[in-house]
């Protein structure tokens, strides 16, 4: 079965550094999402992306965050200057146009030291 | 943003017991989804409920959508250790999740 692929699985960075989290959504999907989950807490919506632009973003998704679909397959989340509180599991998800089922990747565990 | 409240937050039961968890909102949803998340993994869709009053069954899991399409429940019959996980509901209006119910089924 097709799956959403996220890399890396773990990322350790120093506070203030930039990180790029990568996702390869399922090939025929058109909607893309980033969520984050701080350890033991809820799955928080960050941003949704459709037709090469952000369709919705949450209050968490401030100017430090950006998303990009640089080619036909990758979908990236960039955090410009990481903070300690950015430490979390970041999930990418995608879905096709005609269905609302989200397919999630296995996540990237980001640790900011 | 349409807020979803899930209860209970935590639930620990013995194998074989029945349980019900709830997802409530003051907003109306075109449809609601239930996902299960296991440690270290992304959520996996269990079901989508669309019609007010709808009941869907998935083996020992029974999902119900409220008549007013503002709430939903998940009932598990004869719970098994394999049912352990975080159960999340999400509104398809904005694909945001409730905080979840963390279920532990002890053998």
Image (tube, grey):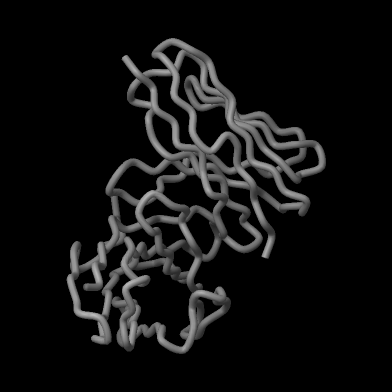
State the residue at coordinates (67%, 56%). B3
Relative to B97, does residue B66 appear above or below in the rendering? Answer: above
Q: Residue at x 64, y 51 (%)?
A: B4
Q: Would you identify the image quadrant in which residue A32 lies?
A: bottom left
For this view, does A16 lie left or right of residue A56? left
Left or right side of B70 for A44: left
As displayed, is residue B23 above or below residue A51? above
**Residue B33: image location, x then y, percent:** 57, 46
Residue at (21% x, 68% y) in the render: A7
Circle count: 0
Quadrant location of the N terminus of chain B in the rendered image: bottom right
Q: Is residue B4 left or right of residue A50?
A: right
Could you say where residue B90 lies in the image, as x and y percent from the top left?
A: 57, 51
Measuring from the top left, give residue A85's x and y in whole percent. Answer: 37, 71
Q: Residue furthest top?
A: B16
Q: Quadrant of the C terminus of chain B?
A: top left
Point 38% across, 22% down: residue: B105
**x and y, in percent, of residue A82 in the image:** 31, 81
Please state if B42 lies on the left or on the right of A100 as rendered.
Answer: left
């Amino acid at each position: 079965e097709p799956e959403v692929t996220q890399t890396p699985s773990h990322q350790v960075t120093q506070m203030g550094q930039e990180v790029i989290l990568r996702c390869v959504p399922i090939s025929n999907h058109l909607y893309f999402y980033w969520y984050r989950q701080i350890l033991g807490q809820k799955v928080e919506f960050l941003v949704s992306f459709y037709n090469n632009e952000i369709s919705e973003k949450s209050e968490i998704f401030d100017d430090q965050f950006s998303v990009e679909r640089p080619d036909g397959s990758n979908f990236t989340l960039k955090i410009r200057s990481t903070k300690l509180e950015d430490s979390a599991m970041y999930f990418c998800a995608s879905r096709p146009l005609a269905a609302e089922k989200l397919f999630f990747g296995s996540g990237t565990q980001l640790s900011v030291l | 943003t349409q807020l979803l409240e899930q209860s209970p937050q935590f639930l620990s039961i013995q194998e074989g017991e029945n349980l019900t968890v709830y997802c409530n909102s003051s907003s109306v949803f075109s449809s609601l989804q239930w996902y299960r998340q296991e440690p270290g993994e992304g959520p996996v869709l269990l079901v989508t409920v669309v019609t007010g009053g709808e009941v869907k069954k998935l083996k020992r899991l029974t999902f119900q959508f409220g008549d007013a399409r503002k709430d939903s429940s998940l009932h598990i019959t004869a719970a098994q250790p394999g049912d352990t996980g975080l159960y999340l509901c999400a509104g398809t209006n904005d694909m945001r999740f409730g905080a979840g119910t963390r279920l532990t089924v002890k053998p």
